[in-house]
Amino acid sequence: MNRFIKTLSIIAAMAVCVVSLTGCGEMGTKHKIGKEARYYIANKYGFRPGTTDVELQKVGELEGVWHKNDGGIATMEYNGYTFKVYVSLVDPGTRYDDYLRPDVEEYLSDYFADALDCEDIHVWATYGVPACMVPGDVKTVEDVFAKCDNIQIYVSTFGLDRDIAKNPDVTGLGENTRISVIDWTLEDCLNDEDLMRETVVGLETDSYTDGFSKVSSYYRYSKGEVSALEK
């Protein structure tokens, strides 16, 4: 019995050591990711933000010390603005950030308000990998449209002029950029990004969604061509 109890004690002690080592390892990894993220932002944009959190990305099926930390996403803050930076520990050259996201959305809102001559408008976009994160060589809003090749822009409007919508100037947004414009019958739909995305997917795949009944017109711009659905 004493030998059995002793064996259990040894196993328990080993488990505590493994957990402790794993915890220390993760803390060290988080510290490294935060440090690398700060250096990356400082070199790219010229300021040094603070790190408020780090979420590790793990690979491997085994737990404990065999559960490898592959990298992670650091949440950063600068002058009251929060953004994220992805850092790979496997490939030191792989760094992405979404610091430009609000500037891109503000630019697009102004762009389409002018191009569509519409005041009731809500615009956002997806681009980069991961979503809305861009690599180190994309430093400005102009770089996003010049260097990213997977841009999808969503435009929600209310009271859109159909004649203007058929031929807007979208030449400055990238040759391969895909643009979807939905003019809604209800102003309340303008800021519902989930409804917009779901309805666009339904319109493109002929799959019925709840948003269909709220669509006044739909326009799709791709590679210089426009397709339209008007009720």
Image: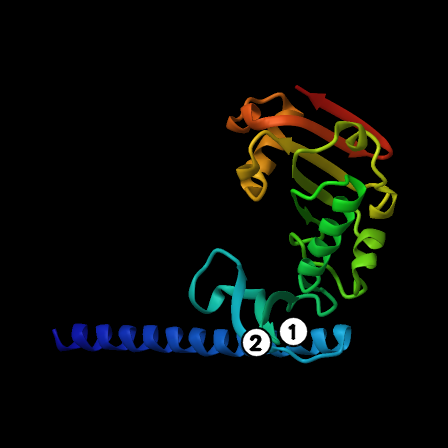
Image location (x, y in percent) of residue 133: 68, 58
Q: Is residue 227 above or below residue 52?
A: above
Local SS, label 2: strand
10 Å crowding of disc 1: few (<14), some (14-19), many (20+): many
Up-down: is 165 above or below 80?
above
Instruction: Judge from the rendering whether residue 6 lies leftward or rightward of residue 168; answer left or right.
Output: left
Expressed as whole percent of the image width and height from the top left, the position of residue 7 reads: 23, 74
Dots 2 and 1: beta carbons under 8 Å?
Answer: yes
In the image, taking residue 37 as reference, residue 67 lies left or right, namely left
User: Pointer 2: what residue?
Assistant: 51
| Disc 1: which residue | 37
Colouring chosen for the image of the structure? rainbow
Q: Residue type at mark 2?
A: Thr
- Residue at the spot x=76%, y=44% of the render? 112
Report the front residue among 76 and 79: 79
Q: Toward the viewer: 29 or 21?
A: 29
Alpha-carbon span between mark 2 and mark 1 = 8 Å
Tell me: residue 146, above or below residue 139: above
4 or 83: nearer the viewer: 83
Q: Quadrant of residue 183?
A: top right
Placement of the N terminus among the 4 image quadrants:
bottom left
* Image coords of residue 79 (percent x, y): 61, 76
Furthest residue toward left: 1
